[in-house]
Image: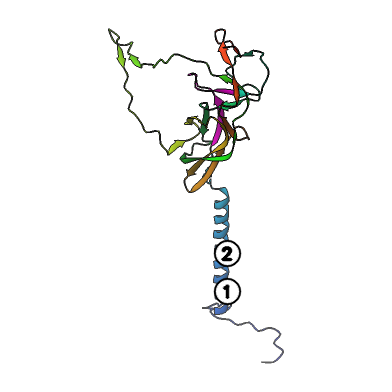
Amino acid sequence: MSGHADAVVQAGRVEHVRIGDQHDRRGVVALLVVVVLVVVAGVAVVWRLTREEPAPPVAPLADTDLRLKDDCTSGWVVPERGDAPVPFTTRRPVDAVLATGGEVVVTVQGQTRTSVVLQSAWVEVLSRTPARPGVYLPSACQSDVVPRFFQLDLAAASPELVPRVFEGEPLTFPFRVDEVEPEQFVITALSPDDEEVAWRLHLRWTSGATEGELVLDDRGEPFRTTGIAAARRFCLLDGGSRWQPSC
């Protein structure tokens, strides 16, 4: 055969075709594994960002109020103001300090549906000073009437008054509060007759693994309870309409 062979063509059957070698296959598998890991990690991040986390426990709220007992055992001490009569009021007079025997009312309520447990309470005494001078305005006196509780079933053919019997429950800590179930504490504060005591109330609370302490005072100032030894006593006269010095 003569001439030049510009192209060589192999005829016959092709039984096997090999693309690349063993090292190439390993590289493809490794790449697939990396892709899968990246996808899984991305899904995990998105799940963590979008899932609903439970709301963390929130400290309860508290409101405080000062009031007199309607049994002649408490009152207000106000600055000296001469002998002019003072109109009676059930509200706290200006610049008044609660006298011994008055009541501190504390209302505690949760801020969420998550229960908060009030575990204990303690009182912090900030100072003791001589009893406050001024004018003592006593509380109104009421008769010592004890209410009796009855139940009346109007669906009965012959309704009758049935005495209600209450099972006594110990008034001791802990107490449980949430946003719909508050607790109210009425504290009768007593001080020595010749002293004024400044104090705050602390409530220790827990909610799950979270705990804290709620500091209660008179709207940013300490509670103050004073004896009346240094105050001039007024009397509640004219049908309870005013305080005046001549009893």
Q: Position of residue 58 (x, y in %)?
A: 54, 41
**Does residue 244 lie above or below 224 as drawn?**
above
Q: Would you identify the image quadrant in which residue 146 lies?
A: top left
Of the pair 71 and 133, the residue shown nearer to us: 133
Q: Identify the residue shown where x is 51% and y is 33%.
A: 108
Of the pair 232 and 169, the residue shown nearer to us: 232
Which mark is on residue 9?
Answer: none
Give, as a single range, the part of the protein colored magenta: 60-76
Q: Amino acid at mark 2?
A: Val
* SS for callout 2: helix
Estimate how packed mark 1 is, as few (under 14), some (14 to 19) or many (20 or more) residues with alpha carbons within 10 Å: few
Q: Position of residue 21 (x, y in %)?
A: 56, 79
Residue 227 in view, yes or no: yes
Q: Position of residue 214 (x, y in %)?
A: 54, 40
Looking at the rendered image, the quarter that the N terminus falls into is bottom right
Q: Is residue 72 magenta?
A: yes
**Does residue 140 lie above or below 218 as drawn?**
above
Q: Is residue 154 magenta?
A: no
Tag 1 residue: 27
Of the pair 199 and 235, the residue shown nearer to us: 235
Q: Earlier in the sequence, mark 2 or mark 1?
A: 1
Which mark is on residue 35?
Answer: 2
Q: Amino acid at mark 1?
A: Gly
**Does residue 13 lie above or below 88 as drawn?**
below
**Does residue 86 lie above or below 39 as drawn?**
above
Residue 69 falls left or right of residue 79: left
* SS for callout 1: helix
Q: Position of residue 57 (x, y in %)?
A: 52, 43
Q: Would you identify the image quadrant in which residue 61 lies?
A: top right
Looking at the rendered image, the quarter that the C terminus falls into is top right
